[in-house]
Image: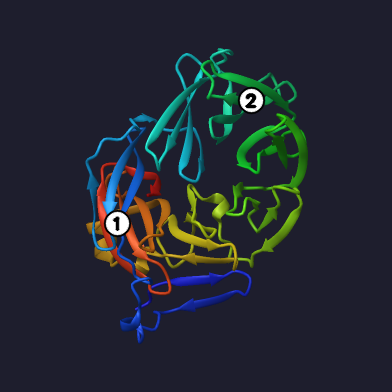
């Protein structure tokens, strides 16, 4: 039976079939560990985010009824994930805003009010990043036209008894922000120059803008790699930029039809060795799902696609699990499992979590139904 498909983007090779099981009896416990793991899982339900704790090992997964610090908050308009922490921005009815920072590992939760000094209901937050107790919020204040619209990056220190902030004006619209090497890299677009993209760099030690790097056009998203490089994703390639020298260190072009599409992903997660787990938008003929689980290996520039049709039967897909679409993908390094969050086809407000073993020994492990759609998760 066909169990997986793998695209080698640079060499354009296509491999099919099962791995050789001749030596399976000799596989060690290290290859197939069975270790207790805790999953902290944010789920979306009725436009609210809440936290579900799960306990698992290599054979079972079940709900943990323990109390956690994260209570239901409004569905995020802008989020930023860095390791075990996630920050979430939401607008408030009084035209201010609120940043919620949750630490998955330590189950710690803090909230910080922002923009209560402006009282501007037209203000639009477009980007957020954080480091420690400092937040970096890219926002715009609309004017009567593009030239009258103002853009800022607000630096907020939430560690003080009275929150302090500094506003730094930008000359382009901020789209996304990433913190790396004591700098904030702000993906921006110039509305007066055909939406040309730039990478504006804020030095957080001196709180000044120190660089404006021309990225050209059609940037989809930026990421921070496991070695703190900045990954700039385009439809047909990605570029690596050193966060220390700000120089381009590599450019990887894809073959037509072999694009990994991680720049269009709804969610993504980095493991400790630099593999990116994400929900891949696809119109490929091998699947009927709009997004499928995928893993991109940046060291070998390889995308591995996990088609539901290849590890689940039609009965399981349509009736037992009711898989509608992929909502998130993560990884349990303790047990070497890929974790796939999905939305139910019969009830979009509910979902589930699948666990599968990755290549070279792909296999379905188990599933748990959830009262909500998985949004982000962390393995403790």
Residue 36 image point, x, y percent: 29, 56
User: Which numbered disc covers residue 242?
Assistant: none
Q: Residue 267's spot in the image, x, y percent?
A: 48, 48
Q: Position of residue 327 (x, y in %)?
A: 40, 49
The residue sitting at 35% across, 76% down in the picture is: 28
Query: Closer to the camera, 246 or 205?
Result: 205
Task: Report whether residue 54 is seen.
Answer: yes
**Given the current orientation, which residue lies at the most extreme bottom position?**
22
Judging depth in this view, the residue of 263 and 21 nearest the camera is 21
For the residues carrying marks 2 and 1, which lies nearer the camera in this image? Answer: 1
16 vs 136: above or below: below
Which quadrant is home to the N terminus?
Answer: bottom left
Looking at the image, which is closer to me, 251 or 32?
Answer: 32
Residue found 56% across the figure and 35% down from its top: 130
Q: Give the number of the disc on residue 140.
A: 2
Picture coordinates of residue 118, whole percent (x, y): 59, 13
Q: Is residue 150 visible?
A: no
Q: Secondary structure at mark 1?
A: loop
Task: Say whether residue 306 is left or right of residue 52.
Answer: right
Q: Secondary structure at mark 2?
A: strand
Q: Quadrant of residue 42?
A: top left
Determine crowd level at label 2: few under 14, some 14-19, many 20+ residues with C-alpha closer than 10 A.
many
Q: Quick check: 345 above or below 30?
A: above
Q: Earlier in the sequence, mark 2 or mark 1?
A: 1
**For the point 23% across and 58% down, which residue is it?**
319
Q: Is residue 100 above or below residue 275?
A: above
Numbered badge on residue 36? 1
């Amino acid at each position: 039976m066909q169990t997986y498909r793998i695209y080698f983007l640079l060499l354009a090779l296509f491999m099919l079939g099962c791995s050789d099981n001749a030596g399976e009896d000799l596989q060690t416990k290290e290859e197939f560990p069975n270790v207790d793991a805790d999953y902290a899982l944010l789920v979306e339900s009725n436009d609210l985010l809440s936290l579900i704790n799960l306990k698992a090992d290599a054979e079972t997964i079940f709900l943990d009824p323990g109390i956690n610090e994260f209570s239901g908050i409004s569905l995020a308009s802008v989020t930023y994930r860095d390791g075990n922490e996630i920050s979430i921005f939401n607008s408030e009815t009084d035209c201010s805003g609120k940043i919620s920072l949750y630490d998955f590992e330590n189950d710690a939760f803090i909230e910080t009010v922002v923009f209560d000094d402006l009282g501007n209901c037209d203000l639009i937050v477009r980007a957020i990043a954080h480091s420690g107790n400092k937040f970096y919020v890219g926002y715009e204040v609309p004017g009567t036209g593009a030239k009258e619209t103002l853009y800022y990056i607000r630096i907020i220190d939430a560690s003080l008894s009275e929150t302090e902030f500094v506003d730094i004006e930008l000359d382009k619209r901020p789209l996304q922000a990433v913190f790396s090497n004591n700098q904030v890299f702000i993906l921006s677009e110039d509305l007066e120059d055909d939406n040309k993209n730039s990478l504006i760099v804020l030095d957080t030690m001196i709180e000044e803008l120190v660089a404006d790097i021309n990225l050209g056009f059609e940037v989809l998203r930026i990421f921070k790699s496991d070695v703190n490089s900045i990954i700039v994703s385009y439809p047909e390639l990605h570029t690596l930029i050193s966060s220390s020298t700000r120089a381009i260190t590599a450019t990887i072009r894809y073959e037509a039809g072999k694009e990994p599409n991680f720049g269009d992903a709804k969610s993504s997660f980095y493991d400790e060795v630099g593999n990116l787990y994400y929900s891949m938008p696809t119109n490929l003929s091998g699947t009927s799902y709009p997004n499928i689980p995928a893993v991109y290996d940046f060291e070998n520039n390889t995308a591995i696609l996990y088609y539901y049709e290849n590890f689940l039967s039609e009965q399981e897909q349509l009736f037992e699990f009711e898989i509608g679409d992929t909502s998130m993908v993560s990884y349990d390094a303790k047990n070497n499992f890929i974790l796939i969050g999905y939305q139910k086809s019969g009830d979009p407000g509910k979902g589930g979590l699948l666990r599968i073993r990755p290549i070279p020994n792909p296999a379905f492990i188990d599933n748990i139904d959830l009262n909500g759609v998985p949004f982000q998760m962390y393995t403790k």
